[in-house]
Image (cartoon, grey):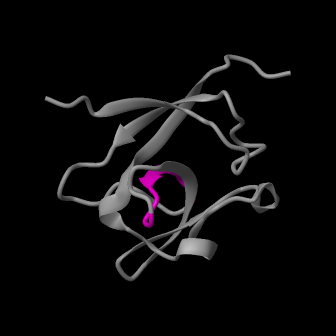
């Protein structure tokens, strides 16, 4: 049985200052077959890039649209790739929602 949680590390700067490279996150997976039923606007989610499904991305779920979610970066100046570039992300590609950042414990 697959765990309902997954740990991931932030690798890029697209979510700064909210999340930074090196931050570790705990993500609660969405239920298979139910899409992103537990995701709400404003939450940070883990998703698969629609054009490159092997690539995982962390973005803010801005709004639900026909067929999926509009995902946004917090820091578009970092060259972020989000829905402004690839459009709506199908619900089936939403892997889960970020519950919290657990590392580092404190920031300067």
Above-or-below relation of 19 to 108 = below
Most extreme residue toward the left is 1
Q: Residue at x 63, y 62 (%)?
A: 81
**Where is residue 89, by image quadrant?**
bottom left
41 sits left or right of 33 in the view: right
Q: Position of residue 88 (x, y in %)?
A: 47, 75
Most extreme residue toward the top is 105
Q: Which residue is drawn at 44% across and 53% down?
A: 47
Look at the image and tell me in which quarter the C terminus lies. Answer: top right
Q: Residue at x 38, y 83 (%)?
A: 66
Report the front residue among 19 and 11.
11
Report the front residue among 23 and 50.
50
Look at the image and tell me in which quarter the N terminus lies. Answer: top left
Above-or-below relation of 50 to 29 = below
Report the front residue among 65 and 58.
58
Q: Residue at x 67, y 27 (%)?
A: 22
- For the magenta stretch, what is the residue range? 42-51
Residue 36 shows up from this direction: no
Above-or-below relation of 89 to 5 = below
21 sits left or right of 25 in the view: right
58 sits left or right of 77 in the view: left
31 sits left or right of 60 in the view: left
Q: Is residue 44 magenta?
A: yes
**Where is residue 5, by image quadrant?**
top left
Above-or-below relation of 89 to 8 = below
């Amino acid at each position: 049985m697959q765990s309902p949680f997954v740990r991931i590390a932030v690798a890029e700067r697209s979510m700064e200052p909210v999340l930074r490279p090196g931050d570790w996150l705990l993500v609660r997976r969405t239920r298979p077959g139910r899409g992103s039923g537990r995701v709400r606007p404003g939450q940070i989610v883990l998703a698969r890039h629609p054009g490159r499904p092997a690539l995982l991305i962390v973005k803010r779920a801005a709004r639900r649209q026909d067929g999926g979610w509009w995902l946004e970066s917090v820091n578009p100046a970092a060259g972020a790739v989000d829905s402004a570039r690839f459009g709506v992300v199908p619900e089936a590609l939403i892997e889960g929602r970020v519950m919290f950042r657990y590392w580092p414990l404190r920031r300067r």
